[in-house]
């Protein structure tokens, strides 16, 4: 049986590509991998990427969501607050973007998800260490 190895990319449907790049650019450092006309844009996340696709028509998502891993969850919380997005003052960080995509943000240090030292270095994230709880979770699975 074939094993799942990871996620190559996620496609997010948005209303307008330029508006989405501007909005997400207020929250995150964005490195644009490329565009496909006015309908698609590709944003790098180290060795992964997000595809933004114009033309969202469905209603906002509440249960369906995806999670982003960041180097500083609290900086994202502050940027969301500055942008006028209602978020909890602490704890989990969930929000809907202007197009209704439900997103959860987690801190790299606190979860089992890992990047190789080479990828972290290439992203300028040398020294981004895991919490003791995350290391223990990885150890229980035989991944460290």
Image (tube, rainbow, N blue to C red):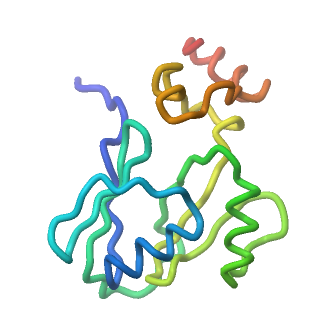
**Residue at the spot x=46%, y=74% of the render?**
101
Q: Is residue 115 above or below residue 73?
A: above
Q: Nearer the viewer, residue 8 or 46?
A: 46
Answer with left or right where residue 1 lies relative to residue 29: left
Answer with left or right where residue 137 lies relative to residue 18: right
Residue 109 quadrant: top right
* Viewport quadrant of the N terminus: top left
Percent of width and height locating residue 60 = 46, 83
* Viewport quadrant of the C terminus: top right
Q: Residue furthest right?
A: 89
Q: Nearer the viewer, residue 139 or 50?
A: 50
Percent of width and height locating residue 138 = 62, 21
Answer with left or right where residue 130 lies relative to residue 52: right
Q: Nearer the viewer, residue 142 or 132?
A: 132
**Residue at the spot x=84%, y=62% of the render?**
90
Residue 112 quadrant: top right
**Residue at the spot x=60%, y=48% of the render?**
70
Q: Is residue 52 above or below residue 38?
A: above
Percent of width and height locating residue 126 = 62, 26
Q: Is residue 44 above or below residue 143?
A: below
Answer with left or right where residue 114 lies relative to residue 80: left
Q: Nearer the viewer, residue 105 or 34?
A: 34
Instruction: State the count of labels.
Output: 0
Percent of width and height locating residue 72 = 70, 49
**Residue at the spot x=47%, y=81% of the render?**
100
């Amino acid at each position: 049986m074939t094993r799942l190895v990871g996620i190559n990319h996620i496609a997010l449907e948005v209303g307008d590509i330029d508006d989405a790049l501007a909005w997400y650019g207020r929250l995150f450092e964005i490195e644009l991998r490329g565009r496909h006309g006015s309908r698609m844009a590709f944003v790098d996340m180290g060795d992964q990427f997000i595809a933004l696709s114009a033309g969202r028509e469905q209603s906002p998502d509440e249960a369906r969501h995806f999670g982003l891993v960041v180097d500083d969850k609290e900086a994202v919380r502050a940027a969301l607050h500055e942008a006028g997005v209602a978020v909890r003052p602490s704890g989990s960080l969930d929000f809907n973007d202007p197009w209704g995509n439900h997103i959860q943000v987690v801190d790299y240090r606190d979860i089992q998800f890992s990047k190789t030292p080479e990828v972290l270095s290439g992203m300028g994230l040398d020294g981004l260490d895991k919490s003791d709880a995350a290391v223990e979770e990885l150890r229980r699975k035989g991944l460290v």
